[in-house]
Image: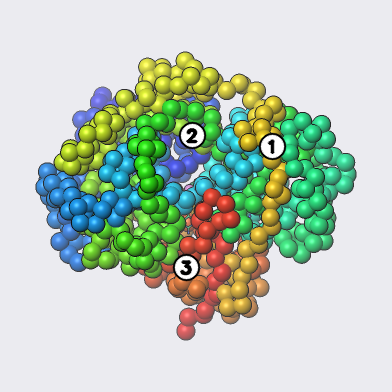
Amino acid sequence: MVSMTLRKARVTCPLDCPDACSLIATIDDTRNALLQIEGDPRHPMTQGFACVKTYRYPERQHHPLRPLYPLKRVGQKGEGRFERVSWEAALDDIAARLKDTLKQYGAETVLPYYYAGTMGLMQYEHPLTFFRAIGASELETTICATAGRAAWVATYGDRLGTDPEDVTQARFILLWGINSLHTHTHLTPFLKKARQNGARIVHIDPYENLTSRFADEHVKIRPGTDAALAYGMARAIVKAGLHDTAYIARMTTGFEAFMQAAEAWTPERVEAVTGVPAATVERLGLEFAQARASFIRTSYGLTRHPGGASALRAVILLPALTGAWQHRGGGALLSTSGAFALNRRYLGGQHLLAQRTPPPRRVNMTQLGTALTALEPPIRTLFVFNSNPAVVAPRSDLVQKGLLREDLFTVVLEQALTETTRYADYVLPAATFLEHPDLYTAYGHYYLSWNEAQMPPQGEARPNTWVFAELGKRLGLEEPTLYWDAETLARSLLDTDHPWLGGIALERLKAEGFVRLNIPPDFRPFTERAATPSGKVQFDPPPQVILTEPTRDFPLILMTPPAKHFLNTTYGHIERLVQGQGGEPVLLVHPRDAQACAVADGALVRIRSQHGAVVRRVRVSEAPIRGTVVLEGTWWEQSAPDGKGINWLTGEHLTDMGEGSTFHSNPVRLEALD
Ligand SMILES: Nc1nc2c(c(=O)[nH]1)N[C@H]1C(S)=C(S)[C@@H](COP(=O)(O)OP(=O)(O)OC[C@H]3O[C@@H](n4cnc5c(=O)[nH]c(N)nc54)[C@H](O)[C@@H]3O)O[C@H]1N2
Ligand SMILES: Nc1nc2c(c(=O)[nH]1)N[C@H]1C(S)=C(S)[C@@H](COP(=O)(O)OP(=O)(O)OC[C@H]3O[C@@H](n4cnc5c(=O)[nH]c(N)nc54)[C@H](O)[C@@H]3O)O[C@H]1N2
Ligand SMILES: [Mo]
């Protein structure tokens, strides 16, 4: 029976995903209940469908593990025993302790740990205003995208790329280091259309997954060797005279040195390093060049390696070599974020940071484990929001040891009682995207959007910015932007002369929900200029080839890429999604590796790295390339047979550029359990 109180509302999905979908929520106002989420048929990228995960958002919104009241620790650290307290009591106590810390140890001993649990600029970045106003240590947000960003910026300047809506016009498509059917599902209709138009689609990935099976061809590559493949393809293209000399002369620098480096990468040498047959290397190069409108959809997978940024640079230089940017649908795409030319001056207290002398202490989020256990002077107060560091950061051993420190005061703002909240002194209930207004950019398309608050918060949940404004008042902070509401922030962000944002005022966003930036309908970036120091696309310096290599003691490379049914650890407590993902994390092992390690299909095995060991069930499978084992998904620790997450194995080693994470490059060995 359909009740009369049901209402449909348009909202943008806040999660850290390139699709930034427009969604239609069905809400029962009488019970303040979210009943359903669907895809918005009006949005050109969303095209009327949501992903398998987000259809389940109502279960997340009303989950028994959603904290609804402020909680204060009563048990031991890590035990997860709390009592309900009032907001007044919680905020007064947190403010008092913070004042003490500031006085006794100084502001640099305070650290915010946050990431993109929500991508809304108000709740993602604006909370930093508080930390910049008190002068806290700065978090370097490197866990995901900084290696990719550094590579792209060094090559092309602006983070722009082929319009995904133009991909239908591409004639040859490389899905390179992206499992797009898991992580970017709203590209699929465009890929299908391109295929109908005659395009061939090739997936380049170390293991066969959903995207490989969708593609026309899967090229299985050893992880961390992509630069060699790209050089091999470039060499074949130039040998055949298929490079675009006019584009290279007009739009690029450093071509000669790049080609000198490529010369060393004969097809045979590429095969020896990458595992890709020599004939395939050449064929891929020629096919890429001959199709003219060739497109590379890449992502962060191949950057999560010691040489990840260099590898990405080598890959994204291919469309510059062939001039593919000039052909509709051709080029490459890592991220569209550079197109959102907002006025970020006051976002998250940027203006406060700019004034700081000396500059604040910086803590790399990929090295949280070391920061919490070895940094001097030690972190004394940690505020966690939009993130689940106990599980997502590498070196879980150090992270969890650090979180157990008696002299560390930890406040976690959360929508779910994650494993991180177990270590909190206070858990503060956070509002969801349906419960607060916010402005959303995107990194997989060119639409800007605005969400109204659609529902009152469940229980006593509050947005992050409310919490930091309350603490600001208690600390007597006078910085006015700390007390801005979402509309004031949005107006400030939209206050720019940039032509791509011309005519996009908050009123229009409110009326339309999402608005396409004023980039041309037939957008062909990097055909006239590149925002690099030279104004050109930079082949120089030639990308280095830095390989991901196993060691004698740890002869296999562990990759830990995203699962279809989770978004990082978000949704990891939704039972139906856990079941959809197979119920428990499993390790894919090539039959030859299984044989060599004497492990059998279905058996539990100990996976050991230099940092620790976890137990997982083995699935013997031809999917991974030999020498590489794969565990999909950052599961909640509770889902693992031994209650330990995969990041007990991963290290804090950083990428060659951008100081990023290296999650897909960890050497391990397998030990049979007796
Ligand atoms: N369903 C789902 N969607 C998601 C997420 C999720 O967890 N689940 N996470 C979101 C987030 S935060 C992000 S950053 C994106 C990430 O989305 P992706 O960039 O697609 O994910 P990655 O972890 O970067 O890995 C992508 C692919 O790269 C492959 N890969 C690993 N190493 C190499 C290599 O050396 N060379 C090559 N060629 N391939 C390699 C992996 O096997 C994997 O198939 O997805 C977002 N969307
Ligand atoms: N081994 C391995 N580890 C990985 C990866 C991998 O591929 N392999 N991927 C890495 C990548 S790409 C990323 S981006 C990181 C992601 O790591 P995280 O940024 O920690 O992402 P999630 O695990 O999704 O956790 C986000 C949390 O934010 C909370 N949240 C959402 N909205 C709000 C809000 O408005 N306020 C507050 N206070 N909380 C909110 C959610 O409930 C959720 O618990 O993980 C990294 N870790
Ligand atoms: Mo990410």
Q: Quadrant of residue 175?
A: top right
Q: Determine whether the residue tagged by mark 1 lies in a helix, strand or loop.
A: strand
Please tell me whether residue 555 is drawn above or below residue 67 in the rendered image: below
Identify residue for label 3: 649
Query: Residue 411: x, y in percent?
Result: 25, 52
**Which label was assigned to residue 537?**
1
Query: Residue 647: x, y in percent?
Result: 44, 63
Q: Determine whether the residue tagged by mark 3 lies in a helix, strand or loop.
A: loop
Q: Which residue is at a point 50% across and 72% down the rendered structure image?
A: 609
Query: Residue 638: x, y in percent?
Result: 35, 63
User: From this viewpoint, is residue 554 visible?
Assistant: yes
CA distance separating discs 1 and 3: 38 Å
The answer to whether mark 3 and mark 2 are in CB contact below 8 A is no
Could you say which is closer to the camera, residue 574 or residue 612? 612
**Which label was assigned to residue 442?**
2
Q: Quadrant of residue 468?
A: top left
**Three-letter amino acid code of the residue under disc 1:** Val
